[in-house]
Each structure stands twice: as structure tokens, then as C-alpha cells.
């Protein structure tokens, strides 16, 4: 076989595999979205790839049985937005300090932050629960939001990013012009680092939006449930045979993320790749 | 806010570096209050008999641990966690590596790499709660999978997937793979594209085969990225909770076949009496096992360096963000 035929055969093989994996990734999601628009009897009759016309009925069944999706969306948004703001602001601040200043424990603390990335954090949730309960903070969102101040993986990303965009001469110039250090951080550094802050923000938001474990431990009041906690109730008895409604509830919970991803997928994919390898 | 006195601005390094302490202070305070203290407190709770139901408790030493070491459920959870992690990690890194090689291959020139990659990564962004309930519905007795396979004549009778240990574990492993291979693919690809093409050009001139180039150039230069991928996956895998908890009844059914250590911890916490002490001891065990395993991985894969600690930092300084 000649070199060229072999390449062509290989290419056909590769594309076949890619298409199969593509289908494996997309088909479950598509079936879920389609089933969200079909009635229970239609769903029981078989799989379809074409949407049905039962969306409104499913929506009424879903919301009529205590699945307060608007509440859930609101609660999740409040928490995730707060987490995003805190994570981006304080991680950038920390990374900026490491990048620009010389202080005694600088090297030590950065090495420490890097090591923290690989420490399992969920295991201390029981202690965290008791500790917050002592301050009567169960069923409060503060325990879900405040820890975002100390996010090692976000700092790590921020540091990599700042190294590539912040020029020290610019900081010196601002100092000569009489700008204070806090002013430099807020008025010069943050605007320069906007694209990085944006990527960092997306990851912080998605991480908090999808987080199930900590809210599940900390929150017990139904009206304070976050979206993942509500989604989990779809498995229960309330919707046992209302398949259309179950699929609709699932669909609603992921559509916001799919839309964000469709718009910003470049940022997100590059964000993962950016930290992974230093130029 | 700091007062803007002219003295502060004009003084040199020493005063400016005061801001180094100021800017790092929020993290340090946040870390001490919300990460370190809860961790130490969890260690303390693990040597008490505290429950959610009673106000008083006693320090009982290592009793929780001796109980744990004679508990067959603990060994089952430990075995499950490792088994489920390895069974998803091996195909995850294998397929990600294969795809990364194809995508970066100059001869194949695969088109729309960005689109393939973006779609393969999509499941990683979705809510694990949604994914778990979705696959639970798909594989339920009257779900789409059974409908399709029975009607297409692949099987005669519908399979009750979640009553079979093997099937439940297989589905869990598949779902974990489905969620994570795209992320691994992107990281490996970033690592591969950063390798200087001159190495490959030189090898090509010497007549090296594709396989030789992969094993002699790509793999060694990719080692830091591989260590990073493996360690983060290990740390995540040892704490696996969302999918195994929500895929079946929250107790790792059938027969505890998908009960991970974290699920066991939650079961003790949420049991009738709320055994906080016992649950904490499981948490402490997860912590210790994960840290030891992570250090072993780093040490084993970076045998030339003498200081594993420093090596870890170096490897991680090349890592990425997993929010």
C-alpha cells in the first residue's frame, strides 16, 4: 500500500471514531431535550429524535408538584454570582501580590497554595458543618459563599495569567504618577487582566452552579434548595411516572450552561489549556 | 483604604512590600477560617462519639477507627472507590491520549479539531446531579436503553440494570468517563502542542517510526502533564460522591456495589442518630489515603528528582485550573 492510501484509510478510520464519540456525547443530551417536549405515553412508546408538542403540559405538571424551579434558579444564581465575584477579586489580588511584591513568606505561601490544589477538600465537610452550626449558619448561604475567598486553583490560574499580561514598567510608571498601590491594582491591573478574569469567572461560576455536596450537607429548608438539590428530587416518588416532566426539569437545569458554553466555548477550552502548559 | 500620604508613596521597597502582606491577607484568613480549621476540627471530631441528637459527647480515642477497621462496609467502600476510579481513569487517559495524538498529527490533518474538542468537553460542564438522574432514567427498566435494545432485537428481555452489581458499576464508570475524557483530552493536547516541532523534525530525518516518536519524544516530554492529570483525577476520584449517590438510592445500591468512601461518610452522617464522630473518621481516612496515594504517584513518576515535595510543586506549577 502506498503512503497516500494508508493516510486516507487512516483518516477514514479516525473520522469514524470521532463521529462515534460525538454521538456518544451528544445523543444522551439530545434525547433528554427531546423527551422534555413529549408526553409520558409517547416516551413509553419509544425513542424519538424529533421534538413533540407536550412542552407546556410537562411544564405545568413539573411546577404543579412543588418543583419550584424559579426559586432554585434564583438561589443558585445568588450563590454562584457571589462566589464568582469573591473568587475572581481575591484570587487576582493574591496573584498580583505574588507577582509584583517581594515579601518574606512569598515563595513559601505560593508553594503552599500549589500544594493545596491536590489536597482533598470535601472530607472536612463534617467539621465544617458542625463549625457553621455553632454560629447558627446552617440554612444560610454564607458558608457556601465565603470560602470562595480562598480558592487555591483559581489563584494558580490567576498567577499564570498575570505573569503573561502584567508589565512591571507600567506599574512603576503609575507609581511615579502618584498612583497608590490599591489604585494601581484596581484601575490598571484589573482592567488589563479582564480576559483572564472573565475565564476565571466562568470556571468559578460553573463550579459553584454545579456544586451539590456542600449545599446538600448545609441546607435543609426546601425553599433554600439550590438547583442541583432540586434536580435530585426528580428521582423521587413525586414524579414516578411523569417522564416528560422529569426530563423537562433536567433540561431546564442544564440549558443555561449549554447556552453560555455555546457563546464562550473558545474562552473555556483555552482556559483549561492555558493553565495546563507554560509557554 | 490606606491614607495616601506623600511619605508612603515616595519611600522605597520596604513600604510597598507591606502591600504584599495586605493583598495576601484575605486568602490567609479565609484559608485558616474555612479550610484549615474545619479540617483540624474534623480530625478532632473523629476521636469523639458526637452525634447530631445529643449535646454532650466524649473523647473516645481511636475507637471510631478500630470500629471502622473491623467494618466490612468500609473495606467494600474502599475497594469500590479504587476500582471505580481505576476503571474510569484508564480508558479516560487512553482515549484522550489517542485522540490528542490524532488531533496533533501533521500527516492526518484532522479538520474541525476545535469543534470536536468543544463537543467532547461539553459533558464536563453539566451539572452532575442532572447527569446522574438522566442516566438513571435512561437505564431504568422501562427507559430508552431497554426500549431500544429490546426492539432492535439485541436482547430478548429488558435488563434491570440497577439491580445488577456489574451493570450498576459499568454504568457508573461509563458516566464518569463520559464526564471527564474531554477535559483530559484538552490538557494532553495543550501539553503535546507545546513540545517543540524541531524534535520531531530531527527524528523524522533520522527515519524514526511514528511509534518511536511517540514513546521516545512525546511521552517523556509529556510527563509533567501526565502526573498532573493523574494526581488531580486521583484526588477527585477518591472523593467521588455526586454520581454514585444519585445514580441509585443514595446507599450505593445494588448491594453497595457503587458505595464509595464519600457515600459511606454521608450515610453515617445522615443515619438516624447522625454519627458525626464516625462520619468524621471516614473523612479522615479518605484524607490520609488520598494524600499518601498522591505523593506515591508523584514520587513514582518523577524518580530522577530527589525531593518529591519540590517536584510536586514544579509539576503543579505547570498544571491547570479545575474549578
Image (tube, rainbow, N blue to C red):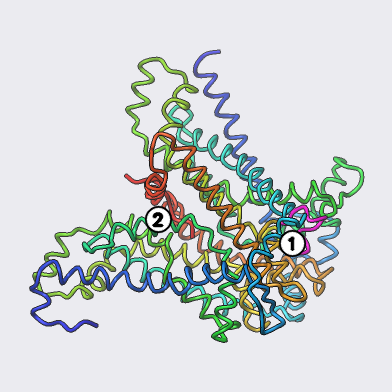
Query: Mark 2 or mark 1: which comes first in sequence?
Result: 1
Residue placed furthest toward the right: B157
Q: Can residue B147 be seen from the camera position used here?
A: no
Q: Secondary structure at mark 1?
A: helix
The span picked out in magenta is B246-259
Q: Is residue A192 left or right of residue A175?
A: right
Query: As rendered, which of A172 and A115 lies closer to the eye?
Result: A115
Q: Is residue B3 left or right of residue A45?
A: left
Residues at marks 2 and 1, CA–CA distance in whole angstroms: 44 Å
Give the percent coordinates (x, y) of residue B91: 62, 40
Q: Chain of mark 2?
A: A
Which image quarter: residue A93? bottom left
Assess whether residue B247 is covered by the magenta stretch.
Answer: yes
Q: Which mark is residue A203?
A: none
- Location of mark 1 (residue): A35
- Location of mark 2 (residue): A114
Residue placed furthest toward the bottom: A136
Estimate how packed mark 1 is, as few (under 14), some (14 to 19) or many (20 or more) residues with alpha carbons within 10 Å: many
Give the percent coordinates (x, y) of residue A32: 70, 59
Residue B201, compared with residue A29, is above or below; it is above
Q: Quadrant of the N terminus of chain B?
A: bottom left
Q: Can residue B174 be seen from the camera position used here?
A: yes
Amino acid at each position: 500500500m502506498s503512503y497516500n492510501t494508508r493516510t486516507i484509510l487512516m483518516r477514514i478510520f479516525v473520522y469514524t471514531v470521532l463521529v462515534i464519540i460525538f454521538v456518544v456525547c451528544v445523543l444522551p443530551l439530545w434525547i433528554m431535550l427531546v423527551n422534555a417536549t413529549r408526553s409520558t405515553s409517547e416516551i413509553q412508546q419509544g425513542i424519538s429524535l424529533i421534538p413533540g408538542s407536550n412542552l407546556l403540559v410537562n411544564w405545568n405538571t413539573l411546577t404543579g408538584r412543588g418543583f419550584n424551579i424559579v426559586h432554585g434558579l434564583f438561589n443558585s444564581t445568588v450563590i454562584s454570582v457571589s462566589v464568582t465575584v469573591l473568587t475572581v477579586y481575591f484570587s487576582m489580588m493574591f496573584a498580583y501580590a505574588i507577582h509584583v511584591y517581594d515579601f518574606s513568606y512569598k515563595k513559601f505561601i505560593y508553594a503552599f497554595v500549589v500544594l493545596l490544589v491536590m489536597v482533598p477538600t470535601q472530607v472536612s465537610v463534617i467539621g465544617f458543618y458542625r463549625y457553621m452550626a455553632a454560629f447558627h449558619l446552617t440554612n444560610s448561604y454564607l458558608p457556601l459563599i465565603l470560602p470562595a475567598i480562598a480558592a487555591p486553583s483559581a489563584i494558580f490560574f490567576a498567577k499564570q495569567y498575570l505573569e503573561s499580561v502584567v508589565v512591571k514598567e507600567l506599574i512603576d510608571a503609575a507609581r511615579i504618577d502618584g498612583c497608590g498601590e490599591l489604585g494601581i491594582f484596581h484601575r490598571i491591573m484589573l482592567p488589563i487582566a479582564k480576559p483572564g478574569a472573565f475565564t476565571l469567572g466562568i470556571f468559578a461560576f460553573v463550579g459553584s452552579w454545579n456544586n451539590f455536596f456542600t449545599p446538600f450537607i448545609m441546607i435543609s429548608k426546601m425553599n433554600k434548595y439550590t438547583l442541583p438539590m432540586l434536580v435530585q428530587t426528580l428521582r423521587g416518588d413525586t414524579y414516578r411516572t411523569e417522564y416528560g416532566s422529569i426530563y423537562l426539569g433536567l433540561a431546564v437545569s442544564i440549558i443555561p450552561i449549554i447556552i453560555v458554553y455555546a457563546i464562550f466555548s473558545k474562552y473555556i477550552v483555552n482556559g483549561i489549556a492555558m493553565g495546563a502548559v507554560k509557554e | 483604604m490606606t491614607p495616601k500620604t506623600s511619605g508612603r508613596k515616595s519611600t522605597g521597597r520596604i513600604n510597598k512590600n507591606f502591600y504584599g502582606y495586605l493583598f495576601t491577607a484575605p486568602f490567609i484568613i479565609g484559608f485558616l477560617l474555612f479550610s484549615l480549621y474545619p479540617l483540624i476540627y474534623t480530625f478532632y471530631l473523629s476521636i469523639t462519639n458526637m452525634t447530631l441528637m445529643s449535646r454532650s459527647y466524649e473523647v473516645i480515642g481511636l475507637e471510631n477507627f478500630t470500629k471502622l477497621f473491623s467494618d466490612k462496609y468500609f473495606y467494600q467502600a474502599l475497594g469500590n472507590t479504587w476500582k471505580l476510579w481505576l476503571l474510569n481513569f484508564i480508558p479516560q487517559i487512553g482515549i484522550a491520549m489517542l485522540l490528542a495524538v490524532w488531533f496533533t498529527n501533521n500527516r492526518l490533518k484532522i479538520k474541525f479539531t476545535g469543534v470536536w474538542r468543544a463537543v467532547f468537553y461539553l459533558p464536563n460542564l453539566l451539572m452532575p446531579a442532572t447527569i446522574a438522574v438522566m442516566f438513571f432514567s435512561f437505564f431504568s427498566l422501562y427507559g430508552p436503553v431497554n426500549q431500544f435494545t429490546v426492539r432492535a432485537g439485541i436482547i430478548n428481555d429488558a435488563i434491570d440494570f440497577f439491580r445488577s452489581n456489574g451493570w450498576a458499576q459499568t454504568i457508573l464508570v461509563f458516566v464518569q468517563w463520559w464526564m471527564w475524557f474531554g477535559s483530559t483530552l484538552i490538557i494532553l493536547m495543550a501539553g503535546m502542542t507545546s513540545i517543540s516541532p524541531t524534535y520531531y523534525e530531527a527524528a523524522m530525518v533520522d527515519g524514526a517510526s511514528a511509534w518511536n516518536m511517540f514513546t521516545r519524544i512525546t511521552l517523556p516530554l509529556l510527563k509533567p502533564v501526565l502526573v498532573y492529570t493523574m494526581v488531580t483525577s486521583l484526588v477527585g476520584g477518591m472523593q467521588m460522591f455526586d454520581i454514585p449517590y444519585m445514580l441509585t438510592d443514595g446507599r450505593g445500591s445494588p448491594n453497595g456495589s457503587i458505595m464509595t468512601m464519600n457515600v459511606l461518610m454521608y450515610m453515617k452522617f445522615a443515619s438516624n442518630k447522625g454519627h458525626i464522630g464516625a462520619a468524621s473518621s471516614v473523612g479522615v481516612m479518605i484524607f490520609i489515603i488520598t494524600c499518601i496515594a498522591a505523593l506515591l504517584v508523584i514520587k513514582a513518576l518523577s524518580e530522577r528528582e530527589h525531593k518529591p515535595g519540590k517536584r510536586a510543586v514544579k509539576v503543579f506549577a505547570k498544571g491547570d485550573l479545575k474549578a
